[in-house]
Image (cartoon, coloured by chain):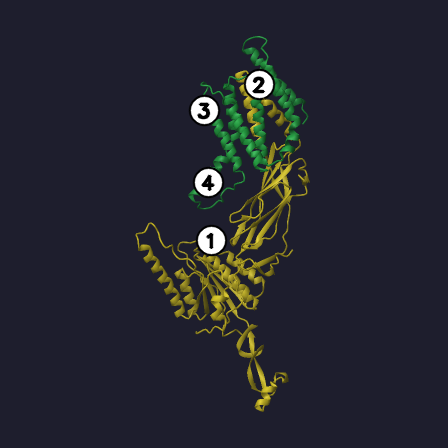
Amino acid sequence: MNRAGPRIAAVLLGVACVAWPAVPVLSTGWPWLALIVAAASVAFSGLRMALLDVPEPEEAYFLSLPGRAWRSFLTAVRLPPWEEIGGAFVLWLEVLHPSRPWHTAILGIVLIAWLLTVHIAESDAPAAGLLRRQARVLVPGLCLLALAAGASALPAVSPGAGAEALEVLAAAAVIAAAILVLPG
Amino acid sequence: MTLHLRMAKPDGQAVTRVSAGSGGLVVTPREVTVRWRLSRHSRRLLTVALLALLLAVLSRRPELAGVAAPALLLLAAGLPRQARPARVSVLVKPGATRLFEGEPGWVDIGLGDDGAAAGGPAGLAGFDARWAFQPGKGIEPASATAVSAATARFEFTIPRWGKRRAGLAELQLHDRWRLTEGRAVVPLPSLDVYPRPGIQEETVTLSRLPSRLGEHVARVPGEGAEFAGLREYVPGDRQRQINWPASTRRGRLMVNTFAAERSQDVVLIVDATSDVGEPGTSALDYALRGAAAAARAYLGRRDRVGVITYQWGSAGWLAPSLGRRQVYKIIDSMLQADATWTQGASFARLPRAALPPGALVVAFSPLLDQRFVESLRDLRERGFALLVVDVLNVSPPARRLALPRGTDTLARKVWQMEQQAIRFSLRELGVPVVHWNGTAPLDLPLAPYTRRPLVVRR
């Protein structure tokens, strides 16, 4: 259970990441494609973690057909960057979603939590120690996320694309400033 | 350092402990190159952050830029600022470089002194080390294959004889937040895995032994300890040899006579031309185990033992010699055996030194190769005392689906008759052929020949 806990948590968080921006599903911007790819990525990510301890069949001059199939399956599950693919398509779904800024902020929290849990599950690192060390960075990061969501919730000073672009630039500038200020 | 090798019965019970005198396992630190890169975790964080920023710009939604913030802060704060070593020193120390089949082995591996690592080297302070063991072909891990520490011990067993590479050890160094990782691959040493010797306590002794001091009781009188008979006293006989009860009964002085004690030359022939059966219980496995057992038994009786390994294209050989080291020389020589087929290959003529005149020749063979059988006949015709241990324990499969019904049974019968004919022809030449199943002690099939000296008709 000690090792299964983070793996189960990672799968659940992955499912939450996909489900959160997927409901309700829109008809424009190929949301079905994004949903299918994101769901498949989370599923394969979970499968990869479930098979972390399974050794690959030994290299043999003549491997049996089931042996070769099993080896190819393990390679197909282990090699592709499923979490990156899943994260990208989850963000695509979120862009398509007619959501409020707080919706995106919650997705951001769940997404980071998913990536951290996957990392803990596959590295077998002690979760408490790792999170305690990273808390001084995660907390300012989440504050910035809340700040960006709050800023976008405020009505723009002037209508038009220019004001929205300025808001994005301001958010990016705040993040850059935080990176520079934060001690290593 | 002396390497101790344990010889075990098939049931695993240790019976003998011998010293192989490895001459010491010298452990020298080895420099390996470390390749550094972003970890999978940081690649994920970077991908999500950059994509979120891109989408924020494209969709003009600042909250998406906020999604990138935690990931970017983690990357910026977590990436190590200290220099990452391009090379590290590694110590590799195998428990033994020579093992018997199934004997547990291990290899200790650790970071050298130049880096008081993650728990160890000074140059690697701030980095955690993790060792992963990738066993070589034919190596079965017997312990955890990954250890998060500066030093690790990986245990394994090797079920089949041969020269094996222990495998690779992969060193993974990562920083405190596991955002960068360095990888280095350390090749582990090669191991000589000896066939597990069978059990043989008794030896076959020739009726005619060369005139060389040994432990076998010869038929000629001599200075041994074995009582041979009585004869009349002649001037010059030692007084202590007088048998007083016999002298009293016969009324004249009688003296005891003793048998001479001689040693013999034994040449073991291993047929490596055909290897049939499952790996681990194949004919070649049994031949090597039987030959190893015979070498131990005869060398234990102070005989001179040599070995000839017949294989396609050539024959490896080792001249008969004495001593415990000869066991290891013989097994090393046999490990060169290669059952691969070479087109047009023929047996090379054996050097005279490999087969001393009057030697006892013990062949371990499945008797499947006609040319090997011919060379056995040739040896017999040259007057050598020959004994064949048949190690064939498999037969062709009973049913092949591709063949018409009945054909396979007929082919099987023909094959069996051919095998019987080969053995019959050897027996007709005066060559005893005994069958060994590979698991029972060799003493059982050899019993008819170990109870009394083997008489050779020339």
Q: CA distance from mark 1 to mark 2?
A: 65 Å
Q: Tell me the tag on residue B279.
A: 1
* Label 4 Cα neighbours within 10 Å, binned few <14 / some 14-19 / many ≥20: some
Q: Position of residue B38 (x, y in %)?
A: 58, 31
Chain under disc 4? A
Write the residue at 48% across / 54% down. Answer: B280
Q: Tell me the tag on residue A33.
A: 3
Instruction: Name the residue type under label 2.
Output: Trp
Q: Is residue B73 above or below residue B159?
A: above
The tint of chain A in the picture is: green
Asked if the residue at tag 4 contacts the one at tag 2, i.e. Cβ–Cβ closer than 8 Å, the answer is no
Instruction: Name the residue type under label 3.
Output: Leu
According to the colouring, which chain is yellow? B
Mark 4 secondary-structure assignment: helix
Q: Nearer the viewer, residue B202 or B30?
A: B202
Q: CA distance from mark 4 to mark 3?
A: 28 Å
Q: Quadrant of residue B113?
A: top right
* Label 2 Cα neighbours within 10 Å, binned few <14 / some 14-19 / many ≥20: some
Given the current orientation, which residue lies at the most extreme front position?
A1
Q: Position of residue B265 (x, y in %)?
A: 52, 69
Q: Earlier in the sequence, mark 2 or mark 4?
A: 4
Q: Position of residue B261 (x, y in %)?
A: 56, 75
Residue tagged by mark 4? A70
Is label 2 or label 3 in front?
A: 2
Is any part of residue B233 visible from this angle? no
Q: Tell me the tag on residue B68.
A: none
